[in-house]
Structures are given as C-alpha cells and as structure tokens.
Amino acid sequence: MIFHPRDKLSPKQGKAVENMDMSPREYQEYLKSINPKSPVWKNIALAFLVGGAICCVGQAIGDWYSFLGLTEQDAATATSVTLVFLSALFTGLGLYHRLARYAGAGTLVPITGFANAVASPAIDFRAEGVVTGTAVKMFTVAGPVIVFGTAASVVYGLILWAVK
C-alpha cells in the first residue's frame, strides 16, 4: 500500500490513494497522470554538451602541461590530479551540484564524477565529526568502486602472471 501525506495530494490523487483497489493497468495510468514527462532529448543534448566541455577542459589542461615541458605520461598524470582537485573544489563550493542539476549525466565523466562522489558525502556529513562523519561517509558511494576495481586488478594480475 502507498502512503502519502494528505496535505500534499491533489483531490484527484487523494481519491486514487483512498481507492487502492486498482488493477495494475489503472495503477500505471495513475502514475502517468501524476508524474511529469521527462524532456529526454533536452537531457541527452545537455549531457553530451557538458560532458564534452569537461573533456575539452581536460584536454586543454593536458596540452598546457605538455606545453610547459612535461612528458606525455607526466602531463596525463598532472591533468588527472588537476581535474580531481578542481572537481573536489567545485563540489565544496556547491558549483558541481548546480552543474549536475542542469547537465545531469554529463557531469559523470569518470574522473570528475568520481571525485565528486568522494567529496560530496564527505561534505554532507562533516557535522557528524571527522571520523564518524567525513571519514566514514566519504567512501559510501566510491568505496564499492574502489574495492571492485582493486579486486578486479588483482584477479587480472594473477591471470596475467599465470599465463606468462
């Protein structure tokens, strides 16, 4: 059974909740009537443009490091570190969240999205203290990714070692 706060329901919704003897088809129609339609093509375009813009910024940073004289590998490392730093900084300033609300999946570019996934819970739970808040919650989202990535790399390494 679905419970809704009565003060937040329209008369149509209130009637539907009171009469929960609905068939699955009627329930699906009810859900369609109360949920707004998502602007799919707009969301796709924004995700593409913003994700592409983040990647272009990363490329420009990498080119700048190469221009300064770093080797290609060192420039790539410095670019990754810079993007993680900028993402964490923008998360702390509340700018990354605003951009994510506007651009949606476009902000999930792997390195910046991962940095945001680590920094955001740490900031949200800082009132609970350094250990029980920030340190514990920091890896709520990113922790499984780190564990799975580490485990997968160990398995891959063992397979590579066994084959050679």
Image (cartoon, rainbow, N blue to C red):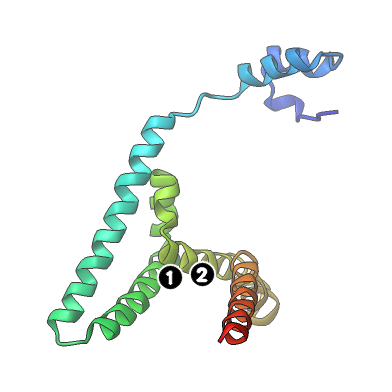
Residue beneath label 2, please? 119
Point out the tag, 1 or 2, that comes first from the N-terminus.
1
Residue 37 against residue 78 in the figure, above or below: above
Mark 1 packing: few (<14 Cα in 10 Å), some, or many (20+)?
A: many
Q: Which amino acid, mark 1?
A: Ala
Tell me where residue 75 appears, x and y as whole percent.
26, 81
Q: Residue furthest front?
A: 164
Name the quadrant containing residue 126.
Answer: bottom right
Q: Could you tell whether 2 is left or right of 90 in the image?
A: right
Q: Which amino acid, mark 2?
A: Ala
Tell me where residue 52 appears, x and y as whole percent.
29, 53
Alpha carbon of mark 1 to alpha carbon of mark 2: how far? 6 Å
* Marks 1,2: beta carbons within 8 A: yes
Tell me where residue 60 appears, x and y as whole percent.
20, 67
Residue 131 against residue 35 in the figure, above or below: below
Residue beneath label 1, please? 88
Residue 74 against residue 97 in the figure, above or below: below
